Amino acid sequence: MHVLTVLDHPNPASFSAAVAQRFINGAEAAGHTVELADLHSEGFKPQWSKSDIEGTPDAVTQEQTRIARADAICLVFPLYWWGMPAMMKGWVDRVWTWGWAYDQLDDPDVSLQRPRTGVLLVPAGARSDDITDGGYLDAMQTAWIDGTFGYFGFSPRKLELLCGSTGSPERRKALLDKSYQIGLTLPTPS
Ligand SMILES: Cc1cc2nc3c(=O)[nH]c(=O)nc-3n(C[C@H](O)[C@H](O)[C@H](O)COP(=O)(O)O)c2cc1C
């Protein structure tokens, strides 16, 4: 498969960047071809603007071209206030457009796009039991897996929260190893 990893982090030395790299290493070890969209270093502009209403800006077409050649897509972003940071949110808003990604709102399992394996690989500072007990995991699962990425054709799709990402070196190593395994064992689109 051709695997596109989309990274939202301004710091190349961040944990999120390390997660993306380990995921890519795993995908390569599985024999996939890989491509990285490093949104900050590439200068992607996340703000949805009047030009997005009037037509499809070149920057958006470039992202759609990159998506078109991918069979699997992995989004890597740190969890900010139980959601996506502005860069990833803007990339999703601007790139996955009505008429290109989807054309109806009734059924989140219907997309204009061919099926692509989708993974959200999300470092989160909180502990997994706090995230689950507080209802945050269910909320993200509903918003992203049930309610957003099906419209984009992500199938199968999975939210992989990397909880405790600011913890001990051992914890962080375990999360990086998990990222590698997720890249190594990516399912094919269905
Ligand atoms: C603005 C901001 C908001 C955050 N919100 C959350 C949150 O809602 N839940 C959580 O578990 N961690 C939250 N965190 C912690 C980050 O998810 C965590 O530090 C993550 O590992 C950052 O990745 P990095 O080390 O690659 O920067 C937040 C951090 C920042 C800076």
Image (spheres, grey):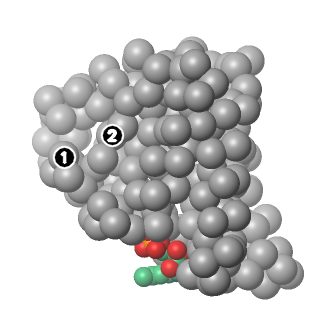
Cβ of mark 2 under 8 A from ligand 1: no
What residue is at 31 percent from the left and 20 percent from the top? 65
Q: Residue at point 14% right, 29% down?
A: 58
In the image, what residue type sits under mark 2?
Answer: Ala
In the image, residue 38 lies at what x, y percent? 30, 47
Task: State the residue at coordinates (70%, 43%).
Answer: 181
Q: Is residue 80 above or below residue 31?
A: below
In this rendered view, identify the residue nearer to me: 29 or 86. 29
Q: How many marks?
A: 2
Q: From the image, tell me which residue sits under label 2.
A: 37
Image x and y of residue 52, in percent: 21, 41
How busy is the neighbourhood of tag 1: few (under 14 within 10 Å), some, or many (20 plus)?
few
**Image quarter in which the C terminus is found:** top right
Which residue in the protein does label 1 denote?
42
Please tell me how crowded label 2 is: few (under 14), some (14-19), or many (20+) other residues with Cα within 10 Å. some
Does dot 2 land on a helix, a strand or a loop? strand
> Which secondary structure, mark 1?
helix
Identity of the amino acid at label 1?
A: Glu
